[in-house]
Image (tube, rainbow, N blue to C red):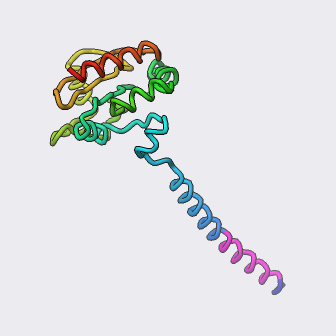
C-alpha cells in the first residue's frame, strides 16, 4: 500500500513538472514564431512586395517624403475590396508603380477603437472617412490620392482591374508633377 501511494505522488509530481516544461516550450515557440514575422523595411519594399502601412505611419511618411499617399478604403464585408486585393494589388506591375511613387495605406473606416492623426488633430474612423469623401457617398473600395504638399485629395471610387488601375496610377503621378 505504501509503495502504491509513493508511486502516485511521484507520478503527480512528474505531471506538474511536465506541465511546466510544456509551458516553457510553448512560450519559447511563440517567441520564435513572433520573431520570424517579416518587418517593413526599404529592402522588403524594393524586393517587389507591396507593404501596406496604417494611416498614422503612412501619412507621416508621405508628408516627410513628398510622395503621394495612396489610401485604399475598404471594409471587411466588401467583396469588391477583396477582389481588388486579389486581382489588382497583387500584380507585379501595380506593385512596382505603387512602390515607386506612392506611400500605400489601408484604411477601414469601420474600425472604431483607433484614432487617426493629421498633424496635431485626431479623428475617429468615421470622421476621417467624412474628410476623405468630402461629404460624398463613394462606397467601397475607393482609392484616395492625397498630395500632402499641395493639400489636395483626389478619389477614384469602385473596383479597378490591373490595366485600368495602372492607367489611373500613371495619371495620378502626372498630376503630382504639375
Q: Is residue 26 left or right of residue 154?
A: right
List x then y, in percent, for residue 105.
35, 33
Camera-side residue of 5 and 25: 25
Question: Position of 165 compared to 14: left or right?
Answer: left
Residue 21 placement (x, y as % from top left) = 64, 70
* Drawn side of residue 74 relative to residue 92, left or right: left
Residue at point 32%, 28% (across, down): 70
Q: Position of residue 13 (x, y in %)?
A: 69, 77
**104 and 44: which one is in front?**
44
Q: Where does the C terminus fall, quadrant-wise?
A: top left
Specify the segment rendered in magenta.
4-18
The reply to whether residue 47 is in sight is yes
Q: Nearer the viewer, residue 50 or 101?
A: 101
Q: Residue furthest bottom?
A: 2
Q: Is residue 89 magenta?
A: no
Give the residue displayed 51% in from the left and 56% down from the top. 35
- Locate residue 173, reporting x and y percent: 30, 22
Q: Main secondary structure of the magenta part?
A: helix
**Quick check: 65 above or below 131?**
below
Instruction: Find residue 155 and report its image quarter.
Output: top left
Amino acid at each position: 500500500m505504501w509503495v502504491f501511494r509513493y508511486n502516485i505522488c511521484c507520478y503527480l509530481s512528474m505531471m506538474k513538472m511536465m506541465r511546466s516544461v510544456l509551458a516553457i516550450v510553448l512560450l519559447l515557440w511563440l517567441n520564435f514564431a513572433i520573431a520570424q514575422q517579416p518587418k517593413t523595411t526599404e529592402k522588403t519594399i524594393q524586393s517587389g512586395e507591396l507593404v501596406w502601412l496604417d494611416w498614422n505611419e503612412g501619412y507621416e511618411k508621405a508628408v516627410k517624403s513628398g510622395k503621394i499617399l495612396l489610401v485604399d478604403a475598404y471594409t471587411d464585408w466588401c467583396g469588391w475590396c477583396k477582389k481588388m486585393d486579389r486581382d489588382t494589388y497583387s500584380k507585379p506591375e501595380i506593385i512596382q508603380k505603387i512602390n515607386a511613387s506612392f506611400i500605400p495605406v489601408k484604411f477601414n473606416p469601420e474600425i472604431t477603437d483607433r484614432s487617426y492623426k493629421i498633424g496635431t488633430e485626431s479623428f475617429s474612423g468615421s470622421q476621417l472617412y467624412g474628410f476623405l469623401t468630402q461629404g460624398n457617398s463613394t462606397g467601397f473600395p475607393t482609392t484616395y490620392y492625397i498630395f500632402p504638399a499641395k493639400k489636395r485629395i483626389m478619389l477614384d471610387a469602385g473596383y479597378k482591374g490591373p490595366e485600368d488601375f495602372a492607367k489611373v496610377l500613371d495619371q495620378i503621378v502626372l498630376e503630382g508633377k504639375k
